[in-house]
Image: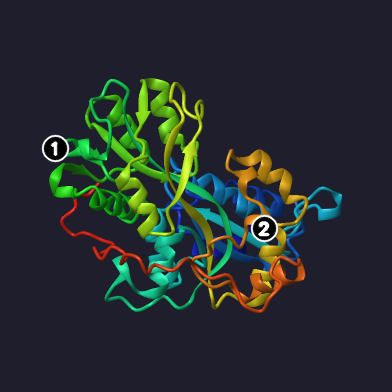
Amino acid sequence: MLPPSLADRLRRFVPFPHAWTARALPGLLTAALLLLGSSLAGAEDIRFFRIGTGTTGGTYFPVGGMLANAISNPPGSRPCDRGGSCGVAGLIAVAQATQGSVENLKEMRTGTLESSLSQADIAFWAHQGIGPYKGQPAFEQLTSIANLYTETVHVVVRAESDIRNIGDLRGKVVSVGEEGSGTLVEARVILEAYGLGEKDMEARYLKPGPAGDRLVEHDIDAFFIVGGHPVAAVAEAAARTPVRLLSFDDPHGKSLKEHLPFFTESVIDEGVYEGVLATRTLGVGAQWLVRGDVPEELVYGITRALWHPNTRRLLDSGHPKGPSIQLANALNGLAVPLHPGAARYYREAGVLKQAAEPEAPPLEKAPAPEEPVTRDDAPAQ
């Protein structure tokens, strides 16, 4: 049993049982065990750091767990030079399951989360107070630690389906992502480019796991999910029934890439999902964000731990997207300014050689979507 003082501090930080079980980072449990094995003399020096991720069926949750493990270094940990943690001394990071990018930014704005993972375009719109955030104050405290990897847009249908492109979704039963997710925002943008909206189909607002289940059970005809492949929910569906992914290799898809520069061309290779051929789709950057009021020294330590040579083994073995997380790409396409602590590390590492920070791609060719980020009329799921 944890000592009362430490247990109380953990309860204040992670409400039980909401985040202590499947929602909490496995590394937090490890940290607690390490503390039990120590004298706990340094327990008062413990600091907590929350990373908002996504649903357990997506990519953000396991990736967030890797990041949290990389930067955590609770009292009693083995020293870095002896094969132990190379994280920030006294830090316990928690990867918290959420609905995704939109909820993450909402919780960061209120201070419930110190940091989170988010799609680049959604972070940009929130920071500027435009697009789906029009009418809301610009989130000026939103800053970045690193660009991590490219997320891909998946539109999944059964292999025998007569749905061959996005336009064929008209009149179908389609899961467009749950409320609070980046997937829902991207689905609305994509559907609009093809002249469709939720009113043109039987829209469902499901998490990735239940959406995959319902596709297999013929309860829905298609589902959207934006995530770094392989996405667990898609892989599980493909293992149970033959599926296909819709391609964006058409004039509408090309128009999306031209008018919204955060979208890039991406290919999901053959064999990533069982029985699924290579598919040309859209990609958007997955970025690690942090509140600007988090102390500079702490974010500097977090950034240094992320790119410590010992972290490479954790990233390469922890998730299929881990090898894509590279220092060379850390500043690519950042949607919001670097946190001063992160910028300090990159300058010392020689990655950021000028005082000016990387700029986000301009959105001059077309306005960002202006539909609100929440919908009161959406069915609860």
Dot 2 or dot 1, earlier in sequence: 2
Q: Residue at x 49, y 66 (%)?
A: 335
The image shows residue 366 at horizontal and vertical percentages of: 32, 65
* Secondary structure type for disc 2: helix
Q: Residue at x 18, y 50 (%)?
A: 197
Q: Answer few, some or many: residues within 10 Å of disc 1's Cα (few below 14, many 20 plus, some between 14 and 19).
A: some
* Secondary structure type for disc 1: loop
Would you place residue 168 above or below residue 146 in this image? above
Left/right placement of residue 185 relative to residue 226 reads left
Residue under pointer 2: 71
Q: Residue at x 59, y 40 (%)?
A: 319
Q: Nearer the viewer, residue 138 or 278?
A: 278
Amino acid beneath label 1 = Gly
The image shows residue 232 at horizontal and vertical percentages of: 46, 35
- Foreground disc of the pair 2, 1: 1
Tell which residue pokes out farthest to the right in this image.
82
Residue under pointer 1: 171
The image shows residue 178 at horizontal and vertical percentages of: 30, 49
